[in-house]
Amino acid sequence: MDRVLSDTAILHLQNGFILPSFPSVATPEVFQNAFHQDFPRVLSGYVASVNVMFAIDPFTRDNGATLVVPGTHQRAEKPDASYLTRNAVAVECPAGAMLVFDSTLWDAAGRNISGKDRLAINHQFSRSFFKQQIDYVRALGDTVILDQPARTQQLLGWYTRVVTSLDEYYQPPERRLYRKGQG
């Protein structure tokens, strides 16, 4: 993340996916099955967010391997549906692999017809000035955060907290809630 985003990147969101299996004719249309951008903020080629999809189960064509459309990252307008379908590539990988991509890439979950759920965990890292989907510092508490290494504190948002008073704002640099150089 340091090279692509910066060493001040934060964990923007984290979510688990259970992709259920359906007969191919009965697969419901849900957000994940439709082509989408996970971070629909295109900033003139500026990479603001990166996804890291951790495959708990193998990704195969039968169990709905993630579909990506190469070359569609950083496009503000959705490409034509036929283009997306025609150029989609199923990313097959073993359990334990990680799929890393620019969050503006057009992607979709494939159709799972394997007879078993497919499991994955998505981590989305972003530049530190984007507000996290969940305030991990508040959710986990200061004690838990402060027990972590400095890099983990950074990723969880410890150095990008919003001040609630002038007293919190006017602190020595090492005690500030929002550290300088965060993007």
Image (tube, rainbow, N blue to C red):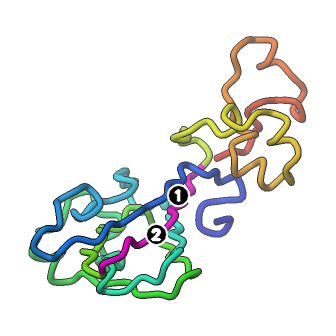
Q: Which residue is mark 2?
A: 119
How far apart marks 1 and 2 lie (CA) works out to: 17 Å
Question: Image quadrant for the N terminus?
Answer: bottom right
The kind of secondary structure the magenta stretch mainly shows is strand
Q: Identify the image quadrant of residue 113.
A: bottom left
Viewer-side residue, 63 vs 8: 63
Q: How many marks?
A: 2
Q: Identify the image quadrant of residue 30.
A: bottom left
Using the image, determine if residue 37 lies above or below residue 137. below
Sequence order check: which comes first, mark 1 or mark 2?
2
Neighbour class for label 2 at 10 Å: few (<14), some, many (≥20)?
A: some
Q: Position of residue 145 (x, y in %)?
A: 80, 42
Q: Secondary structure at mark 2?
A: strand
CB within 8 Å, label 1 to label 2: no
Left or right: residue 159 versus residue 126 is right
Magenta segment boundaries in residue numbering: 115-127
Q: Which residue is mark 1?
A: 124
Which label is found at residue 24? none
Q: Is residue 174 magenta?
A: no
Left or right: residue 159 versus residue 129 is right
Viewer-side residue, 169 vs 63: 63
